[in-house]
Image (spheres, rainbow, N blue to C red):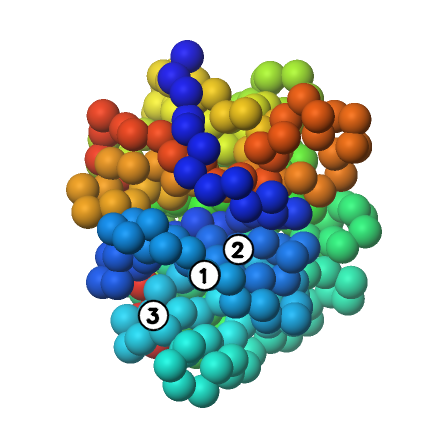
Amino acid sequence: MAQAELLLDAKAALGEGPSWDERNGLLYWVDIDGKALHTYEVSSKQTSVVPLGKKIGAVVPRKSGGVVLVLEDGFYAYDPSGDGLTFLGNPEGRKPNTRFNDGKCDAAGRFWAGTMSMNGTANQGALYCLETDLTIRTIFENVSCSNGLAWSPDNRTMYYIDSPTRKVMAYDFDLESGEMSNPRVAVEVTEEGAVPDGMTSDAEGMIWVALWGGYGIRRWNPHTGELLLKIDVPAEQSSSCAFAGPNLDELYITSARVGISEANLLDQPLAGGLFLYKSDVKGQPTYAFGG
């Protein structure tokens, strides 16, 4: 089994959503319950924390500068050198007592992000898409915990996780229209106590999935369901991963401490940390929001 190394002992309550800003050499990630946006500059190893006052689900770079993110109450732009937070919109018909969770941009610059119930009620969430003209499209509803997103290198397949199903779904994807079709199961997680959380893909078309409750990352062939690699992370609640760095061969992994008892934290003191795994395979880039 491969081993991820601790990069930053952040002790995040609910670390999530890493994304790579290639233009500025910055890794972004979020602490949902800590209500903060984190940055890590890969070259200098400098870090910053921006408190936002609301739960933050995911963050992506923006082509025009700054970032776009989902807070608990909708889509926002954030420009640290300009206007700060700017509200972009909240989906119509969104169910009450839900919050945004994971999100990611496709190669056309659309920002896909989903929601989940804040009290654990099933089927209250949905998957949405913020188009580059800032309109918001509802993709589908009756989701329990909208989570990982990824695309194949040719952009013809989209992968999606609703965590409690313990499945990674694959869809035919039309990059030009942003339409998904033909759902099928790519991978089913069978490890006891573990559910699939955040996800990314690599240049070979394989998917890398963080296992919440599984102490690590798994690399699967989504065409065959074959498990190719296990990466051990010293944090039970491994939450998400993204390729970053100048060669896109560094896998950054987030984790969480929320819900772990003080006694159990003694066995995993690095929970909530940011971890790094040096990969032999290059990852897919983080695409920026195009609007």
Looking at the image, which is closer to me, 228 or 161?
228
Viewport quadrant of the N terminus: top left
**Position in image of residue 15 (x %, y %):** 56, 47
Q: What is the secondary structure assignment of the residue under circle 2?
A: strand
Sequence-wise, which precedes: disc 3 or disc 2? 2
Q: Residue at x 42, y 56 (%)?
A: 47
Query: Which residue has dot 2 on it?
Result: 30
Residue 39, image quadrant: bottom left
**Position in image of residue 129 (x %, y %):** 47, 64
Q: Residue at x 26, y 57 (%)?
A: 25
Looking at the image, which is closer to me, 23 or 161?
23
Query: Which residue has dot 1 on it?
Result: 48
Whole-angstrom CA distance, mark 1 to mark 3, is 19 Å
Q: What is the secondary structure assignment of the residue under circle 3?
A: loop
Q: Nearer the viewer, mark 1 or mark 3?
A: 1
Residue 58 located left or right of residue 73: left
Query: Three-letter amino acid code at disc 1?
Result: Ser
Q: Residue at x 73, y 49 (%)?
A: 123
The circle on residue 62 is 3
**Position in image of residue 147 (x %, y %):** 55, 46
Q: Are marks 2 and 1 in contact (CB under 8 Å)?
A: no
* Mark 3 neighbour class, 10 Å CA radius: few under 14, some 14 to 19, many 20 or more: many
Residue 251, image quadrant: top left
Residue 206, image quadrant: top left
Query: Three-letter amino acid code at disc 3?
Result: Arg
Q: Residue at x 23, y 25 (%)?
A: 280
